[in-house]
Image (cartoon, rainbow, N blue to C red):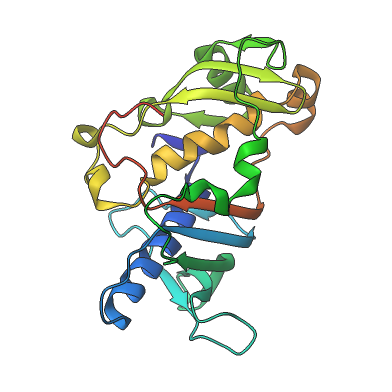
Amino acid sequence: RDHLVQANMVYPGAGCLAMAIEGMRQISVSESSPLPRIRGYRLRHIEITRALIIPDTTDGVEVQLLLQPPTSRLAPNWREFHISSATTDGDWVEHCHGLVGVDTEELPSTQDPTIRLPSTARIHLNSTDGVYFRSIEPAEMFRTLRKAGIHHGPLFQNLSSVRAGSNKAMASILSVDSTATQSTSSDHVLHPITLDSVFQLAYAALSKDAQRETGAAIPTSIKDMYISDAISRESNHAF
């Protein structure tokens, strides 16, 4: 009940991405010999086509992750994935699809691994030079979202030091407290609640006028995303 959209319990889109990553990790480990040294995971052409609403019943909802076998149009370390849920009629409805890849590239020990991601160097993270000119109180941001119909309960409120500029935002993010969830952060490459905090910054990047126009809209597509396997899995870690 900590993630509601228009009073419906909605499974976070970040959870779908975490599901695809975990599936790819298991496949990579089970199909490779010797075991690969995984550097990270890449997601491309992600489309969230339908909200996954969780019924308020003891039965819940059955969800399926399908990772397609490799095809000639994809490199061996990439898979197409689909996430669907079962309907009461026994059919399957798709909620998310895209591509997920695992990076097992071995780099020389003296080489900075970030050189594989040139866009990293272009991300402006200086909060004091005027680019991020608005300071945003997280509590106020979550109140504004609640008025628009998007409710984040305590488990999903992990932002601090939020600052925004023109169509951009930055913040400190506290990884999910494992004592408050049924799984520990170490069970995941990146806990879906922590990843959801990243997506929340999309709202912070909007001007107040744009926020009013956006209303209860939620992210539905991602062009490209990279998640390092070396990211901290510690509970309450500050990013």
Which residue occupies 52% across, 76% down? 79
Outermost residue, bottom side: 72
163 up-or-down from 99: above or below: above
- Residue 64 lies, in percent from the top left, at 41, 71
Is 143 displayed left or right of 164 in the figure? left
Q: Toward the viewer: 106 or 235?
A: 106
Left/right of residue 78 with respect to residue 45 in the rendered view: left
Q: Is residue 183 left or right of residue 90?
A: left
Is any atom of residue 239 visible in this view?
yes
- Report x, y in % for residue 229: 37, 53
Depth order, front residue of 230/147: 230
Q: Is residue 98 above or below residue 189?
A: below
Task: From this view, report whether residue 120 is shown above or below residue 43.
Answer: above
Q: Quadrant of the C terminus?
A: top left
* Relative height, residue 86 to residue 133 (above, below): below
Q: Position of residue 171 (x, y in %)?
A: 52, 22
Front-most of 115 and 189?
115
Identify the image quadrant of residue 215. Answer: top right
Front residue (pair 12, 129): 129
Seen at 68% across and 39% down, the residue is 217
At 51% from the left and 30% from the top, the residue drawn is 151
Q: Position of residue 197 (x, y in %)?
A: 48, 34
Q: Dividing the picture into quarters, in which one does residue 173 lie? A: top left
Instruction: Name the outermost residue toward the left.
Output: 179
Q: Is residue 7 visible?
A: no
